[in-house]
Image: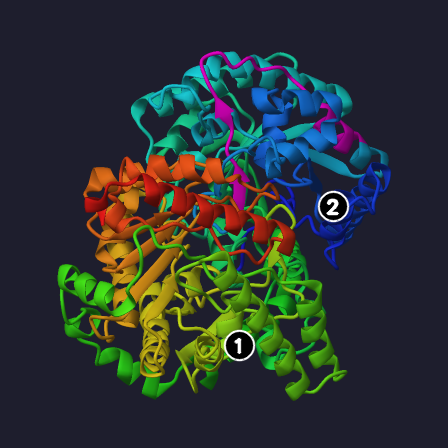
Amino acid sequence: MTAKPAAAAARATVYGYPRQGPNRELKKAIEGYWKGRVDAAALRETAAELRRGTWQQLAESGVHDVPTGDFSYYDHVLDTSVMVGAVPGRHRAAVDADALDGYFAMARGTQDVAPLEMTKWFDTNYHYLVPELGPDTVFTADSAKQVAECAEALALGHTPRPVLVGPVTYLLLAKPAPGVAADFEPLTLLDRLLPVYAEVLADLRAAGAAWVQLDEPALVQDRTPAELNAAARAYRELGGLADRPKLLVASYFGRLGEALTVLAKAPVDGLALDFTESGAGNLDDLAAAGGLPGKRLVAGVVNGRNIWINDYEKSLATLGTLLGLADRVDVSASCSLLHVPLDADAERGIDPQIARWLAFARQKTEEIVVLARGLTGGTDTIAAELAANRADLASRAGATLTRDPAVRARTAAVTDADGRRSQPYTERSAAQRAHLGLPLLPTTTIGSFPQTTELRTARADLRAGRIDEAGYEERIKDEIREVLSFQEKAGLDVLVHGEPERNDMVQYFAEQLTGYLATQHGWVQSYGTRYVRPPVLAGDISRPEPMTVRWTTYAQSLTARPVKGMLTGPVTMLAWSFVRDDQPLGDTARQVALALRDEVNDLEASGTSVIQVDEPALRETLPLRAAEHAAYLEWATESFRLATGGVRPDTQIHTHMCYAEFGDIVQAIDDLDADVISLEAARSHMQVARELAAHGYPREAGPGVYDIHSPRIPSTEEAATLLRKGLEAIPASRLWVNPDCGLKTRGWPETRASLENLVAAAREIRAELPTEAA
């Protein structure tokens, strides 16, 4: 096909960009600041250098207007809370004393003050800080960050487009502040919030911003008529301001549906829409709404959440159709490029043929620029790029890596019986109690212990050849012995080996399974200064040999107490990887589940009586529209049962989930048929325990009493108070005591003190319980 030239030259742009820098310079500077090795001025200069580098790279590649304000020291939703003055009362003194330290206190807490709750950003693995609002919340504008970064870009000769979280999404993401009635709806504060946004917009116009982007991803979810009316009112008011820049309202992660008509009718100057994850939905809805006459459309035709190269011909066909539906059509990724690594060219260990299939943020920017050029000048202007793209797509489609007949045959042979335990939970639980002999309110941890500098150095020494495999394994054994010794002295009941040999809970397994590829520099922000390297799931999955049995059985040999085998579940293996896009997710999940089933069975055969299969991404991966929930949850829960269904009744299967909203998937949690589930609950004040009780969840559960994403050490009384709240919802006979999540990111001093307090709290509560509770 030959695309018709656009009426106006199409421009290339992006919604947002990775923040960390090529070598995670931001992470190092912030953590240096926390430790007192970097002062505030040096931290700010590092941040400024990273922004300058990003804008320069974008401009040189051909991007027209560069995003500003999307850069963050920790989280862009927290930045929005600062911008609108929504600082919790408990943090106000810290913010007033030092804005930067107060900002980090809201994110991480202090020994005396709890941080904001943290949860997942829609269906991604990025975590945001949840705004706390109430009927007494007073909003005040603080546009300093946005104005400064806009002015910074202008001074460097760029065309800035400040990016703000939109007011409707901000309020829909918020929760009632502690002490506020649970049924309070933050969206009722919209009329109070809009004047603050108006003030920020006026400040940005005065600073030289021609356009401002307002992100409204919450509108791709199911929304009530009242919520859609609120969106209409918000953009009618903001669009009607006399003193404002042009407004680009951006949505992503799916189909807008009814909200598209609302925004199309609003007096704003442009919309940015996702044309990848929405399928043909946004395109059809836009046509049905009569297009965007007189407005700008930013078309997200390059997938901003996965790392496969774009199909230029397919994207140009979509763009060509869109030309008649808006005054001008510009080209972008489907969402911020925050969700992909920085630069595929930095990878040196990937097969050159496979490297041709990959596009990280920098390569996606180049794809956007090529598509904008082709849309403007016709396909003849990008003939060479089109030919190379066709060849790369054909290379991937025909690669033997992507298909393993033996794996496909095994997956096709799976029966319903493979995904069921041999006995119901009531019978299994009795067998497990007899076999394990655990006390009331058994204590355990989630799996990982601190990943010390010494451990990271050992891995680096092994890779560099400074130590051999035998030397490395001795270091791992020393760490396991220390972790086991501490747990026994602290009084924990079910132990873990601490996972010192593991670099990441997904990557570690991916490196031992066929079909996966690991990157060296593919870092993606998960939260704050925590970055992960999602592996690339490129082909069919199988397990050549046991992955965890050796270290688990070694740990068990050091103690008479049960040691949990630790695995990552099939849904999380998909969600925290860059998954293949050439077959249904459910098919891939079954392949991973069968590989894990082999590992579970080998662990049991080696004498492991407690096996934890973590699924923290079960809720995260839930589709944003309710109509799609049932199909997803069917294959997601089936894959977990397939991984765990082959063990004996007296083998106890645990799972773990964290930092998500669990209330709407409690039935799916039940359907997993795990014997014990541990869940994050400390920051949300045991909300999940109440949700389990409301559902009538019949199995054992451990809502967390230690927030591991904060450096603060919970006291014995604090942990006991949370346990008492848990007991209001879950009977003592089914309640476990554990942290919220793994301890990998914590230091040893705080870990020791916190776990000792956790065990002391469990003992205190046991002593309070009547004898018949057992």
**Pointer 1 local density, CA inside 10 Å: few below 14, some 14–19, many at least 20:** some
Q: Are marks 2 and 1 in contact (CB under 8 Å)?
A: no
Front of the two marks 2 and 1:
2
Front-lying residue, 177 or 579: 177
Which residues lie in the magenta part?
126-151
Q: Amino acid at mark 1?
A: Glu
Q: Residue at x 27, y 78 (%)?
A: 411
Residue 593 coordinates in the image, percent (x, y): 33, 72
Front-lying residue, 391 or 498: 498
Q: Is residue 162 visible?
A: no
Q: Would residue 704 be counted in the magenta stretch?
A: no
Residue 733 coordinates in the image, percent (x, y): 24, 49
Q: Amino acid at mark 2?
A: Ile
SS for callout 2: helix
Q: Residue at x 69, y 40 (%)?
A: 73
Q: Quadrant of residue 389?
A: bottom right
The residue that disc 1 covers is: 511
Residue 30: which disc? 2
